[in-house]
Image (cartoon, rainbow, N blue to C red):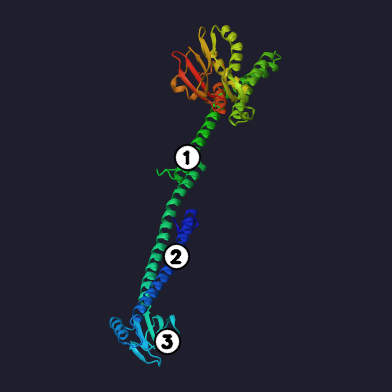
Amino acid sequence: MRLDSLRRSTPFRLAVTFGLLFIFTFLVSGAIMYRMLSSGLEHELDASLHEMNAVIASTYAPNDMEDIVATLTSYMELQTTKDGLYSLVDSEGRRVAGNFTATKMPVGVHTVTPQELGLPGFSKYRIEVTKLGQNLLVVGQSFEDVNNLLRTVLVSLGWAAIIVVSAAIGGGIFLAARAQSRLDAVARTMFDVSNGRLDSRIELQGRNDDLDLVSMQINSALDRLSGLVEGMRQVSADIAHELKTPLNRLKMTLDEAGQDIACAADVSGLLADARAESDKINSTFEALLRISQIEAGARRERFQKIDLIDIVALVEEVYVGVAEDNGQTFRVVAAQSANVLGDKELLTQLIVNLVENAITHCPEGSSVELSLFSETGQAVVQIADNGPGIPSSERERVFRRLYRLDKSRSTSGSGLGLSLVKAIADLHSAEIKLSDNQPGLAVEIVFVSI
């Protein structure tokens, strides 16, 4: 990935933002820690100085200076002026004991420079001045050890900051590059799809992270899109194939009518045939339009509580006689009510189409049974017959628009009946199951009951 592309990428900007936030947090916390450590060391220095001053002062006696002088001498032998300062001066300002001569200064604790004490060096001193009778006791300790420790801490924090900054920048670039590469894969897939390669899919990393979840959703949408586009191609081909024959017949009929008109012959029969072919073509397009409207959900606002037993009773009333005329038996088994949410007209159309299909495609002497029963949270409508059935390899295809098992088109029908059934079932969130009735076919529609 080029650097300019990386700088423009959202993952890199997020990584830099969080990296800067992390660095800022580290620096602030480091500064707070440094300040707390400095204050703590100064407090410890004051406590040590006060304790040392108290020990030395306790050896003072107004008429006996020997003990305090010996104590100061002992401390001086253990430390140099760079580490500790000790001075006992009399009322005239003369040094009685110690490693430097203290000038007159107020009683208390002070921070002074070496120059103020007449000493070489640059490290400041913390001193405590105590009045002992007419004498002045000055005890001091250098900040050099404290400064050395703070300097070490500061250097350590500096190196830590460099490491943190490097890790934040390097890690940010690494993570941003990985995330951007996955986003680029999404972009490439969408580019391929927009250029007609509908089989292109985003490769999943198998981590089940947010990018994988988004990729799975996009792949699912692309699967759906691919199926819809393929369905449209298939429908277009089926429409062309299905309408080619009636359009040719219509053309031939009109040509023949034109020749008969030229011969002054009667063409009323030919015009009736042409009108019938035109009506058939129109009905096919109307059915296709109706299926499209149903699939678009245009009828969902008309949903209401429907008792399927009323629809089953209506179908029984109409089709018992139709089956008898065909030499068939039609029987209804509906033990109880089954309420669903839906469009009564469309649900009636669904059951009617299935019953008509069974009656139309079953030979004389066949039996057709329409059943309605309820299960836990479900209402099931079943249409079973003992006719020729549908081969298992064709059961998914029969729901395609204009698809017919009779490839020769010798039987009546447009191949849209089951497509309409599938569209109505999908609108009502119902499941259609085709199974072997041994012999014949069993169609089961499972609704969610209310």
Q: Residue at x 38, y 84 (%)?
A: 138
Using the image as rendered, state which of residue 98 and residue 227 is in the foreground.
98
Where residue 204 sits: x, y (%)?
Answer: 42, 43
State whether residue 163 is above or below residue 290: below
The amino acid marked with disc number 2 is Leu
Earlier residue among tags 3 and 1: 3
- In the image, is residue 426 above or below residue 55? above
Amino acid at the residue labelled 3: Glu
Q: Amino acid at mark 1?
A: Asn
Up the image or down, 21 lies above or below 146; here it is above
Q: Position of residue 28 (x, y in %)?
A: 46, 65
From the viewer's perspective, tell me whether residue 249 is left or right of residue 142.
right
**Which residue reaches farthest right?**
264
**361 left or right of 91?**
right
Q: Which residue corresponds to mark 1?
A: 219
Query: Mark 1 or mark 2: which is in front?
Result: 2
| Nearer the observer, 315 or 147 | 147
For the residues marked 2 and 3, what is the alpha-carbon distance in whole angstroms? 36 Å
Residue occupying the far front of the picture: 63
Dot 2 and dot 3 residues touching (CB under 8 Å): no
Residue 429, position in %: x, y? 54, 28
Q: Which residue is mark 2?
A: 27
Mark 3 sits on what residue? 116
Query: Residue 266: where, in percent of width, then height?
Result: 70, 13
